[in-house]
Amino acid sequence: MGDTPGGDTPGRADKSTVCIHIPKALFDRVETFCESKNLSPEEFILDAVSEKLTAVHKERRRKQRL
């Protein structure tokens, strides 16, 4: 048994769990959207965070440097 979240589950040893608090109304909207697109809320949230971080990184790279 490993010390990492996911235990001995193959393919999960490199993943960790983060607990966040979001308003229930927002999570309900996410669940409704995900049901219509056949996605899990976790997958949707992971994709959204990844896309936001990529956009922020690109925006910072566009700024002129002194």
Image (cartoon, rainbow, N blue to C red):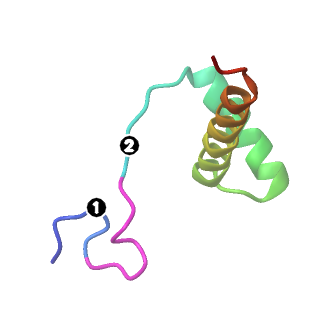
The outermost residue toward the top is 66
In the figure, residue 11 lies in which quadrant? Answer: bottom left
The outermost residue toward the bottom is 10
In the image, 21 versus 64, the foreground residue is: 64
Is 42 part of what is drawn in magenta? no
> Residue 60: x percent and y percent?
66, 27
Say above or below: 49 vs 2: above
Q: Amino acid at mark 1?
A: Pro
Q: Residues within 10 Å of mark 2 (few under 14, many from 20)?
A: few
Instruction: Identify residue for label 1.
Output: 5
Instruction: Identify residue for label 2.
Output: 18
> What span is in magenta?
8-16
In the figure, residue 52 lies in which quadrant? Answer: top right
Rendered residue at 34%/78% (across/down): 9
- Considering the image in quadrants, where does the C terminus appear? top right
Q: Is residue 7 left or right of residue 15?
A: left
Rendered residue at 72%/36% (across/down): 58
In the figure, residue 20 lies in which quadrant? Answer: top left
In the image, 44 versus 37, the foreground residue is: 44
As measured in the structure, the alpha-carbon distance from the residue carrying label 2 to the one carrying label 1 is 10 Å
Say above or below: 53 vs 66: below
Rendered residue at 67%/41% (across/down): 54
Q: Amino acid at mark 2?
A: Val
Is 9 part of what is drawn in magenta? yes
Magenta residues, dominant SS class? loop
Q: Is residue 16 left or right of residue 61?
A: left
